[in-house]
Image: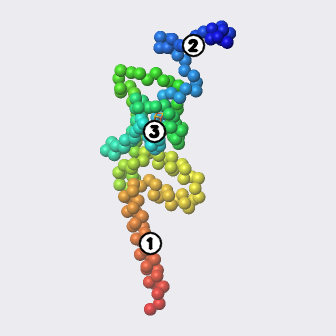
């Protein structure tokens, strides 16, 4: 069948689009601009770890007490890895694809989250308040004993944890020594 006959039969005379002179409706399945929901993001950084061209970066500012998850669309290759790995479902792939802009700053989006403060020394931890809260909710699935043990540690910074638990261990050892000594016959 000649091409002319084929097109006469199928009514498909138009094989190109007038885009960008006319708007183009992208297919629903198109993997376009990924968007981070600032209300769902906990700042875990899994998306940044998975992003092949480093379009997503995470910066922790201990002076301001903030964690910044930044996406630069100028580097994005629309692979969807960030969407796959996000544990909170905070990333959604839209079918928006028209990203051209004369201003580079238009291609940047940032989620800013407060860091958790150690209740003992007041220093900021590397985790956000949301991450700690998330971990806390996960603990409810554990048996009571194990949960208690972890709860004592999870809100403290590394230094305080070390100090508190080495002090406790020291006390325990001293107590064991005392018990041992008191049981030793003269
Ligand atoms: S993986 Fe999801 S929750 Fe974690 S930083 Fe990225 S967007 Fe936020
Ligand atoms: S779609 Fe791919 S390239 Fe774009 S931000 Fe997500 S992981 Fe990075």
Q: Quadrant of the N terminus?
A: top right
Cα gap from disc 3 to disc 1, whole angstroms: 47 Å
Cα gap from disc 2 to disc 1, whole angstroms: 81 Å
Q: Residue at x 47, y 58 (%)?
A: 152
**Residue 15 tag number:** 2
In the rendered view, tell whether residue 91 sits above or below residue 130.
above
Query: Does the beta carbon of the residue at mark 3 sit less than 8 Å from ligand 2?
Result: yes
Labels 3 and 1: the sequence-earlier one: 3
Is 13 placed left or right of 166 in the picture?
right
Q: Secondary structure at mark 3?
A: loop
How busy is the neighbourhood of tag 3: few (under 14 within 10 Å), some, or many (20 plus)? many
* Residue, disc 1: 172
Cα gap from disc 2 to disc 3, whole angstroms: 35 Å
* Residue, disc 3: 51
In the rendered view, tell whether residue 71 sits above or below residue 1.
below
Query: Does the beta carbon of the residue at mark 1 sit less than 8 Å from ligand 1?
Result: no
Q: Residue 77: horizontal and vertical position, in percent?
A: 46, 31
């Amino acid at each position: 069948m000649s091409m002319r006959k084929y097109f006469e039969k199928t009514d498909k005379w138009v094989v190109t689009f007038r885009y960008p002179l006319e708007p183009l409706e992208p297919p629903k399945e198109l993997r376009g601009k990924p968007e981070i929901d600032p209300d769902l993001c906990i700042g875990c950084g899994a998306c940044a770890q998975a992003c092949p061209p480093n379009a997503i970066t995470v910066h922790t500012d201990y002076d301001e007490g903030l964690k910044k998850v930044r996406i630069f669309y100028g580097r994005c290759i629309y692979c969807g890895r960030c969407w796959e790995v996000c544990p909170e479902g905070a990333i959604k792939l839209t079918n928006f694809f028209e990203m051209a802009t004369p201003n580079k700053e238009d291609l940047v989006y940032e989620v800013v989250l407060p860091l958790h403060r150690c209740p003992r020394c007041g220093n900021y931890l590397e985790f956000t308040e949301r991450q700690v809260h998330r971990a806390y909710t996960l603990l409810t699935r554990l048996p009571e004993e194990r949960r208690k043990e972890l709860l004592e540690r999870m809100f403290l910074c590394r230094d305080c944890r070390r100090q508190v638990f080495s002090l406790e261990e020291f006390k325990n050892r001293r107590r064991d020594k005392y018990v041992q000594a008191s049981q030793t016959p003269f």
